[in-house]
Amino acid sequence: MKADAMKVVVQSEPFDLGAEVAAISQQRTDIGAIASFVGLARDSNDGSGVQAMTLEHYPGMTEKALVTLVDEACTRWALLDVTVIHRVGRLLPGDPIVLVAVASSHRGEAFAACEFIMDALKTRAPFWKKEETPEGERWVDARVSDAEAAERWDGIE
């Protein structure tokens, strides 16, 4: 995949899933599948209510890490286009946080690459989450389940 065929953005503004998928497929007849994932802010975590979440990142460094993940996916699967949008700033429950959309000729590659990018993003992209709960603010630690999900891709080409 050519570098100009991918979109990697870190932004505070909401994104529109329909518009992003339409942009990928606009005037393209070589795409047979687009797999997408949208992550949303939840109102609870680890048994506690969550009133809001603030996502922080290192500008420039975070985008570079996301591009590296997309490049890795492109070496593993025959992809035609990829969009990754990750939000930062204060988010409320129900707000969209992240979008990963992957286009390929066939669904299997689109599904696998989409899942790989999301699993890798959770463990290798420099984002930090702080939750506002009724008990006060707290930083969210990395989950063991996220590391396990990312590890399953090791050795898979």
Image (tube, rainbow, N blue to C red):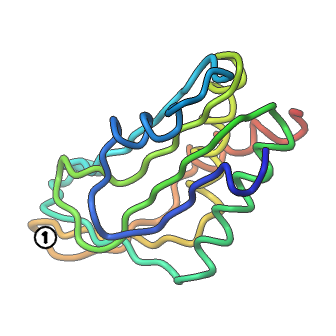
Considering the image in quadrants, where does the C terminus appear?
Answer: top right
In which quarter of the view is residue 82 placed? top right
Count of labels in the image = 1
Residue at 15% in and 66% down:
133
The reply, left or right, for residue 143 in relation to residue 153 is left
In percent of the image, x 22 and y 76: which residue is there?
137
Position above or below: 109 against 47:
above
Residue 108, image x, y percentages: 69, 17
Residue 46's spot in the image, x, y percent? 31, 50
Q: Position of residue 67 (x, y in %)?
A: 68, 62
The answer to whether 119 appears left or right of 59 in the picture is: right
| Figure check: 66 above or below 2 | below
In-image side of 6 versus 13 (left or right): right
Residue at the limit of the structure toward the left, as seen here: 134
Q: Which residue is mark 1?
A: 135
User: Which of the 4 image quadrants contains residue 38?
Assistant: top left
Q: Percent from the top left, x then y, of residue 22?
A: 42, 34
Element class at badge 1? loop
For image coordinates 52% across by 61% down, the residue present is 142
Residue farthest along the front direction in this orientation: 27
**Toward the viewer: 95 or 123?**
95
Indicate whether 100 appears above or below 11: above
Tell me if residue 139 comes above or below residue 117 in the rendering.
below
For the point 53% across and 52% down, the residue is 84
Where's the N terminus, which quadrant? top right
In this view, the residue in front, 28 or 19, is 28
Badge 1 local density, few (<14 within 10 Å), some, or many (20+)?
few
Q: Amino acid at mark 1?
A: Glu
